[in-house]
């Protein structure tokens, strides 16, 4: 098991501007945030609001590094996490065009490029990202992929494809190379963000083509490197559900609804069964667009989410029963803000 570093608790977002930056927020014991400044990523963001992905800003599993995709300059930034700052170590080509999502497991990194959809692999060694020769895998031209992520044990790589309404899995070999893809139809249209609950339960949001009131989430069992539906399209009555995180005890999934400012809570039961508990467990600005990327602090106590249209981060304390209690909001972000990682 990789040990976490002792770096201070923080929240990180990228500005996604043409001169991209990471903004660091120090987290206090009560969950409140303090903006302690921006750090150049050395790359260029898309400079447009609402980067369509989950996982554009990711903390490594040991907490020592931050990975950021630069969508316009086709590269990835590696930053070291210090107590009160992040320090740029390297900018490396993403292995494709328009990188928007990135995943890491114990030093193995895969970047999801979305221009011509593809995956590219890297090893994080001694503060450097080194490309893995022969790791590039091309996706379907109409994939419109949203997120890449590893299973908890690192044996499987998952990609959600909005364009093909599919969840695609690939085995991960010891040398970091990927096996052949296995595509399974999503039980609901427009699969977007996802998160694992425990070793083998995958929770996936379904945006339903942005149809009003048709947002849903589904759960799947990861079995032998592929996924099988457990709970199909559990609706929440909201709109444009896109991002998902799971509580540290794997009992709850929290999803953000871009179109109406709500965080929904789903209970995760035996065998990965999914049940809607509260469609409006947390509210940013009720009925307003903009709520998107989210994460839970490493101690499991706080949930944070970007509201791009109000240029803010909203925070909630997570109760023992999954309740969300507002702890405030912090504004002044650019409308292009994207990605969020919490330590």
Image (cartoon, rainbow, N blue to C red):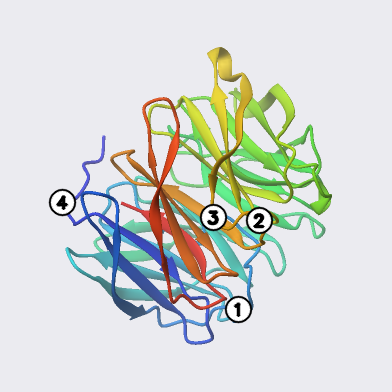
Mark 3 or mark 1, which is nearer the start of the sequence? 1
**x, y percentage for residue 280?**
60, 40
The residues tagged by marks 3 and 2 sit, at their Cα atoms, a distance apart of: 10 Å
Q: Which residue does the numbered mark 4 point to in the structure image?
A: 6
Mark 3 or mark 4, which is nearer the start of the sequence? 4
Q: Secondary structure at mark 3?
A: loop
Residue contact at pointers 1 and 4, CB within 8 angstroms: no
Residue 281 falls left or right of residue 207: left
The crowd level at tag 2 (other Cα within 10 Å; few <14, some 14-19, many 20+) is: many
The residues tagged by marks 1 and 3 sit, at their Cα atoms, a distance apart of: 25 Å
- Closer to the camera in the image, 230 or 145: 230
The crowd level at tag 4 (other Cα within 10 Å; few <14, some 14-19, many 20+) is: few
**x, y percentage for residue 65?**
30, 60
Mark 2 or mark 1, which is nearer the start of the sequence? 1
Q: Which residue does the numbered mark 1 point to in the structure image?
A: 46
Q: Secondary structure at mark 4?
A: loop
Does 154 sit above or below residue 143? above
Q: Residue at x 70, y 70 (%)?
A: 115
Mark 2 or mark 3, which is nearer the start of the sequence? 2
- Closer to the camera in the image, 59 or 321: 321
């Amino acid at each position: 098991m990789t040990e976490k570093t002792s770096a201070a608790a923080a929240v990180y977002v990228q500005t996604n501007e043409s001169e991209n930056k990471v903004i660091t927020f120090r987290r206090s014991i009560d969950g409140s945030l303090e903006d302690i400044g921006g750090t150049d990523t050395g790359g260029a963001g898309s400079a447009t609001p609402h980067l369509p992905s989950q996982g554009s800003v990711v903390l490594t599993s040991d907490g020592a590094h931050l990975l950021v995709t630069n969508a316009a300059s086709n590269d990835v930034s590696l930053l070291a996490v210090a107590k009160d700052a992040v320090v740029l170590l390297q900018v490396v080509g993403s292995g494709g065009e328009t990188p928007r999502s990135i995943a890491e497991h114990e030093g193995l990194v895969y970047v999801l490029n979305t221009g011509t959809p593809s995956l590219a692999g890297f090893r994080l060694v001694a503060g450097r990202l080194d490309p893995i020769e022969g790791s590039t895998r091309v996706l379907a031209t109409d994939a419109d992929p949203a997120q890449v992520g590893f299973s908890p044990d690192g044996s499987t790589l998952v990609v959600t494809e909005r364009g093909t309404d599919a969840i695609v899995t690939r085995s991960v070999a010891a040398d970091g190379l990927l096996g052949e893809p296995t595509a399974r139809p999503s039980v609901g249209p427009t699969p977007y963000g996802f998160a694992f609950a425990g070793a083998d339960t995958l929770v996936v949001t379904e945006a339903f083509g942005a149809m009003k009131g048709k947002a849903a989430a589904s759960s799947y069992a990861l079995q032998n490197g592929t996924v099988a539906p457990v709970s199909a399209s559990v609706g929440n009555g909201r709109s444009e559900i896109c991002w998902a995180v799971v509580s540290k005890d794997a009992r709850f999934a929290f999803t953000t609804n871009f179109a109406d400012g709500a965080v929904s809570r789903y209970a995760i039961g035996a065998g990965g069964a999914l049940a809607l508990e509260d469609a409006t467990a947390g509210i940013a600005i009720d009925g307003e667009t903009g709520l998107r990327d989210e994460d839970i602090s490493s101690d499991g106590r706080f949930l944070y989410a970007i509201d791009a249209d109000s240029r803010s981060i909203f925070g909630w304390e997570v109760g023992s029963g999954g309740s969300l209690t507002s702890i405030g909001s912090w504004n002044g972000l650019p409308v292009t803000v994207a990605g969020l990682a919490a330590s």
